[in-house]
Amino acid sequence: MLDGDTEDAEARFAAAKRFAKARGYRFLDARKVARLPVQELLARIELTSGDEMRDPLGADSLLGGAELPLITVSRALELFWSLARDKTLGKSADQVRRWRYPHIKAVQKFVSVVGDKPLADLTIEDFLDFRDWWAERMASEGLTANSANKDLTHLSAVLRRVNRDKRLGLNLPLEDLGFPQGKAARRPSFSDAWIRGRLPARSALDGLEPQARAILHVMVNTGLRPSEIAALRHEEIRLEDPIPDLLLQPIGRVLKTQNAERVMPPHGVSLEAMRAFPDGFSRYRESSATLSATVNTYLRDAGLLESERHSLYSLRHALEDRMLAAEIDERIRRDIMGHALGRERYGEGGRLATISKLLEPIAF
């Protein structure tokens, strides 16, 4: 009752639902209460007539008088962060920011197209208007269906979660809005000649921020994801071990997949770069998105991309190509790259000494 003594519609509605539950009933709106069997309806009315139930919240909770709060689309996003906190468990601050951003972007775009409407007022026309807006952008700007579908997915995640967890009971028309996916464009690899002749050369990368340059060099012979390298901490950089290695584990962050937990021996320019930063890369530890933007912009401006479709991530693909050319077993290649095997894993896979011995001959 104390919680319901408020002008905040959301708080009062939540209090009414808790009050009904405490009396052994499920909250229903007035229209549904009116359709209840007579005996249950009378039981609810009788409860509201007692002295202890004279507070208006009693009738609101058992007879459905509490009004559904008007939660707008932008308000739904605010509520989503606390309702979906399970999605951020174990994530680093950088990972939480990267998880939040596409949800914010999708909601902002939707509001710019249809307005900041209450969820209860949203219709199929609103969602089709948003879909049409994306279709026009895809046609005029050459954007892919993947870009549109990501926005639709993140918008749906916000609205569905709020509708469910706030028990709003709304029928949101979110089905079948996505666009058909074409074949995903494959990120090209850097050729061996390009890597050998351009990227490890100190003079070519002199203008790149030192930590970003070192991370690029670490990628050359390890194939680690930029975010994985940026997140490394002092205790995970074990350069004094008999076989120098980098330990990737879910401490203070969530790894992309369970297969991403692995040990990687750096060789050549990668080992040299790690020795220059034995405590890791503090500048990008909580900002891996800035890292990728910094490196890709520099490579593009300096003419160090082999084609317009190449990027920093092409170094990861390049290592896999070199491993394939060296006839390294698929199980070990997948272990090195942190990929799923596609079947149950037996044994320990490639041991550190074996992996180190296989990677050394193909390192730059």
Image (spheres, rainbow, N blue to C red):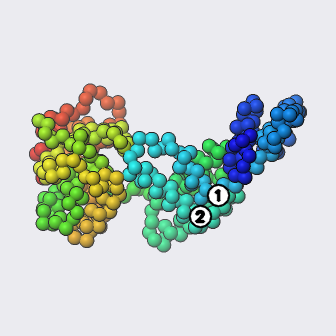
Q: Can you see residue 329? A: yes
* In this rendering, position of residue 309 left or right of residue 4: left
Pinpoint residue 311: horizontal percent, then vertical percent. 28, 61
Which residue is at a point 52% across and 53% down the rendered structure image?
Answer: 154
Give the quadrant of residue 50: top right
- Height in image: 271 above or below 127? above
Name the residue tied to disc 1. Answer: 72
Q: Can you see residue 41? A: no
Q: How many marks?
A: 2
Instruction: Give the foreground label among 1 and 2.
Output: 1
Identify which amino acid the numbered label 2 is placed on: Val
* In this rendering, position of residue 111 left or right of residue 286: right
Question: Can you tell which mark lies on residue 273?
Answer: none
Identify which amino acid the numbered label 1 is placed on: Thr
- Height in image: 199 above or below 355? below
CB contact under 8 Å: marks 1 and 2? no
Give the quadrant of residue 240: top left
Pinpoint residue 353: horizontal percent, then vertical percent. 15, 34
**Label whose residue precedes the other's in the sequence (1 or 2):** 1
Which residue is at a point 12% across and 62% down the rendered structure image?
Answer: 201
* In this rendering, position of residue 327 left or right of residue 178: left
**Element assignment for label 1:** loop
* In this rendering, position of residue 77 left or right of residue 299: right
CA gap, disc 1 and disc 2:
10 Å
Name the residue tied to disc 2. Answer: 111
Please rate how many residues cluster around mark 2, counting C-alpha atoms within 10 Å: few if below 14, some from 14 to 19, many from 20. some
The quarter in which the N terminus is drawn is: top right
- Height in image: 8 above or below 308? above
Pinpoint residue 15: horizontal percent, then vertical percent. 70, 42
